[in-house]
Amino acid sequence: MSADPHELPQPRPGEGGERIVLAIVLAGAAVRLVLGALVPITVDEAYYVDWARHLQPGYLDHPPLVAWLLAPSLALLGSSTLAVRLPAVLLQAGTTLLAASLARARGGRAGAVTLALLLQAVPIFSLGATLMTPDAPLAFAWAGALFALERAFRRDPRWFVAAGAFLGLAALSKLHGGLLAFAFLAALLASSRGRSALASPWPWAGVVAAALVASPMLFWNAANGWPSILFQASHGARGRALSLGRLAGSLGGQAGYVSPVVLVLAAAAAWRALRRLEDPVTAALALSALPVVAFFTALAALTPGALPHWAAPGWLSACVLLAVAGSSPDLHRPAERGWGGGTRHLRSALGVGFGLSGLLLVLIGVVFLVELPISPNPIDELRGWSEGARAARAVAGDARLAADHWIVLGQVGFADGRSPAYVGERRSGPTFYDPAPLASGAPHLLVTVEGLDPPRAELEVRLGPLSPAGGFDAKDGARVIRRYRFWWLAAPPRRG
C-alpha cells in the first residue's frame, strides 16, 4: 500500500526547495531565451504569427490560444524571433513551477527538485519548449489542471473551479485537452474519494468553468461546421493499415524526445501508479500518462505523418509520477523501489537527459556556425526566407504578396512583416479569417517556391493567367537553398 499523501508531513515555508526550484527554472529560461533568439523561426511558428495578425476565436488547424499569446508579444517587441519565443519560455517556466508544486505536495522537497530538473533535462520539455507552438500553452494548462486537482482534494474543494479553468485553457491550446478531461472523470469515478467529491457541487462548477473558458473555440467551431475537429480527425485517422515501421519510428522518436532512461523509468512509475487508483490525484496522473502515450503511439502506427511529440503531455504526467516515486517515503523500502524510483536510477536518468539535451545544443551550434559539407543541410528549411521576402518585396513595390502554400505564407509573411494573400487550394487558417483575399481586384505578386508549389500550368487552372515577374535563388555559398519564382496575378502596377 502507498502512503496517503494527505497523511505525509507537509514542508514548512522555506523547506520545500522553492529557492532551488526557482533557480533551476531561471537557469533553464536563460538558456532557452538565448537559444530562442538565435535559432531562426520554424515553419509552424511563422504560420502562427500570421494567425496572431488576425485574432479569431478559432482556427482550422488548432484552437486559438497560441495566436492570442503571440499577439501581445509581437506588439510589444516587434517581429523578431525573440518576440515569438518569449511566451513559450515564460510558459515553460510556469509549467515547471506548477508541476514542481504538485510534486512537492506528493513527494516533498526531493520530489519538487527532481521534477524541476527532469523538465530541464528531458529534451521535449527543455529545448522543445523554446518553440512557440500550441504545445507550450497545452503543457502549462495540463500541469495547472493537475496542480489544482491535487489542491482541491488536499486543501479546499473550491480548487475544482481552478482545475476546470485550466482544462478550458488546455482545450483552447490543443484538442489534447479533451483527453485530460476524460482522465479526470475516470479518476474521480475510480476512487471512493472521487465519487464522494462528485456528490458535491464543486466538480460541476469546474465543468462550468471549463466550458466557459473553452467557449470561444467551441462556439466558433459550431458556427463554422466544426472545422477544427474534422481537420484533426482526418489528420489523425488517415491510415489504412498497421505499420510496424511507423510504430518503431514513433517509439524511437519518443525515446529521443524524452531520453531513453527517463522514458523507461517514467513508464514504469506510471504503470505502477495505474495499480493505485484509490487515490484520485494519483489516478488522474496515471490515467493522463500511459493511456495518453499509448493512444498517440497506436495512432502513429496507423497514420502517416503522425509525430512523436503528440504524446508529450502523457510524458509530463509520467515525469511527475517518476519524481514522486523516487521521493515518497514508502518507496524507500527495497521491495518497492524497482525501476519506478530510487535515487540511483533517477540520477542516471537525469544524467542521460542532460547529456542528450547538451548534445543537441552542441549539434544546434554546429549546424548553425559550421559549414557542413552535406546537401541538403538539416537547417535549410529555416534559412533563405528573409532574402526571398526582400526580393519579392523589391518586385512587388506596394502590392500585396500572395502565397499558394501555407509554409510560404508564414515564412515570407513573417520576413516581410505583412500577411500575404493565401490563394492555395487546400483549406488553411486564412480560409476562415481572410476568405476572399483577391476580391479587391488589385494586383498581387504570387511567390512560389520550387518543391512546395505546383507548376505554373496547374496554378493557372485555378488562378487564371500568370505574368512572369522574375525570381530569386537563396544560396548558401554556391549552393542553392531555395528557388523562388514570382508571378503577377493581375497586370503589374504602373511605376512612375
Image (tube, rainbow, N blue to C red):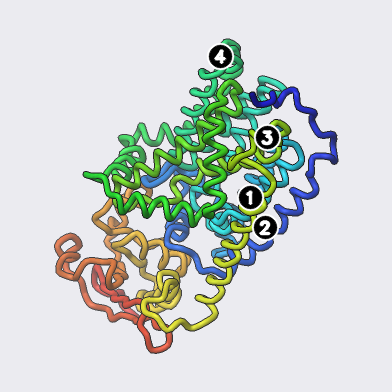
Residue 331, disc = 3
Q: Within 10 Å of the Cα at label 1, are there few (<14), some (14-19), or many (20+) other Cα atoms?
A: many
- Secondary structure, mark 1, is helix
Q: Relative to 130, is 101 on the left or the right?
A: right
Residue 400 percent across, percent down from the top left: 36, 66
Marks 4/2: CA–CA distance: 40 Å
Give the side of residue 423 with respect to residue 118, left or right. Answer: left
- Mark 1 vs mark 3: give the one in front: 3
Q: Nearer the viewer, residue 226 or 39?
A: 39
Q: Nearer the viewer, residue 400 or 3?
A: 3
Q: What's under tag 3, amino acid-wise?
A: Leu
Q: Residue at x 39, y 79 (%)?
A: 391
Quick one: label 2, few (<14), some, or many (20+) residues within 10 Å? many
Q: Residue furthest front?
A: 335
Q: Which of marks 1 and 2 precedes in the sequence?
A: 2
Dots 2, 1 in contact, CB < 8 A? no
In terms of image quadrants, where is residue 35? bottom right
Seen at 74% across and 48% down, the residue is 21
Identified by mark 2, the residue type is Gly
Spatial CA span between label 4 and label 1: 33 Å
Say which mark, if any, is on residue 118. Answer: 1
Q: Circle 4 — which element?
A: helix
Residue 370, placed above or below residue 85? below
Q: Report x, y in % for residue 469.
A: 27, 78
Residue linked to disc 2: 28
Q: Can you say which quadrant of the picture contains the N terminus? A: top right
- Label 2 to label 1, Cα distance in Å? 11 Å
Residue 266 appears in the picture as rendered: yes
In terms of sequence position, does the residue under pointer 4 or pointer 1 come before the other? 1
Quote the CA–CA distance across marks 1 and 3: 19 Å
Tell which circle, 1 or 3, labels the residue nearer the N-terminal end: 1
User: Which mark is nearer the camera, 2 or 1?
Assistant: 1
